[in-house]
Amino acid sequence: MVALFIFNLLLTHLLVKKKIYPLDPGQEMRHHANEALKSRLALIFVLAFFVTFFAQALVNDQLDSSSFSPGTSFADSESFKAFMEKEEAADLYDGQFSSNVEYYDEQGRPIPEEEALREYFYDRDGQLFGSYIARNQTVALFQLGSDQDPFLIRLHTVQDLAHGHRILDLINIGFGLVYLVVAVVLLAVYYKKRQPGPVRN
């Protein structure tokens, strides 16, 4: 719609300039007035487009799905460890945990389940903070510590991130609607303020 508006602006200007589309004095005055209005509105649209585009890019660069998910907080490592070691399958997996799984090390030697599933996590300074047996498959990510509370552990499940991703999608749809609304408003302004006449602008 906006592309057609700009194309019409350029085409009409070219036809009049090349004398392919001759105008009488009255028509020429209306034509120049309407072309000036088109140019101003097109410039406003371009500026609004870039402002909205950079705002959208900034939102998507600085925020992610976890930004829109409260997640689950743990004030101590023991409660966090208990959650991580709870046997729970993600919704993506439809079934039960198998008790007949065998684990092997890099050399192909059998190892116990606890050794195979053990994970370690570290504080903000890179110091070992603790370990756990990773049995909870619903966990997508966790963040350890903050400046206000270095011992706070915030965890996000697969469902949490899916919810946050839906919110982020809605925000991007909102930006898309901003582009459309700006275009419609500017077109409405043009058709309201243009000087009518026999020449199509």
Image (cartoon, rainbow, N blue to C red):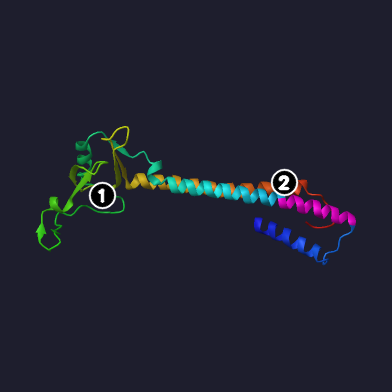
Q: Position of residue 164 (x, y in %)?
A: 40, 45
Left or right of 54? Residue 90 is: left
Left or right of 30? Residue 87 is: left
Residue shown at the point (47%, 45%) measured from the top left: 59
Around disc 1, counting alpha carbons within 10 Å, would you say few (fewer than 14), some (14 to 19), or many (20 or more)? some
Q: Give the camera-side residue of 197 and 144.
A: 144
Quarter that holds the C terminus: bottom right
Which residue does the numbered mark 2 point to in the structure image? 189
Q: Position of residue 148 (x, y in %)?
A: 32, 32
Q: Position of residue 132 (x, y in %)?
A: 18, 45
Residue shown at the point (15%, 54%) measured from the top left: 116
Which residue does the numbered mark 1 point to in the structure image? 137
Disc nearer the start of the sequence (1/2) = 1
Seen in the picture, residue 140 relative to 103 is either above or below; the reply is: above
Residue kind at label 2, given as amino acid type: Val
Mark 1 vs mark 2, foreground winner is 2
Q: Are marks 1 and 2 in contact (CB under 8 Å)?
A: no
Residue shown at the point (73%, 58%) measured from the top left: 9
The quarter of the picture where residue 6 lies is bottom right
Magenta-colored span: 25-39
Residue shown at the point (20%, 47%) measured from the top left: 120
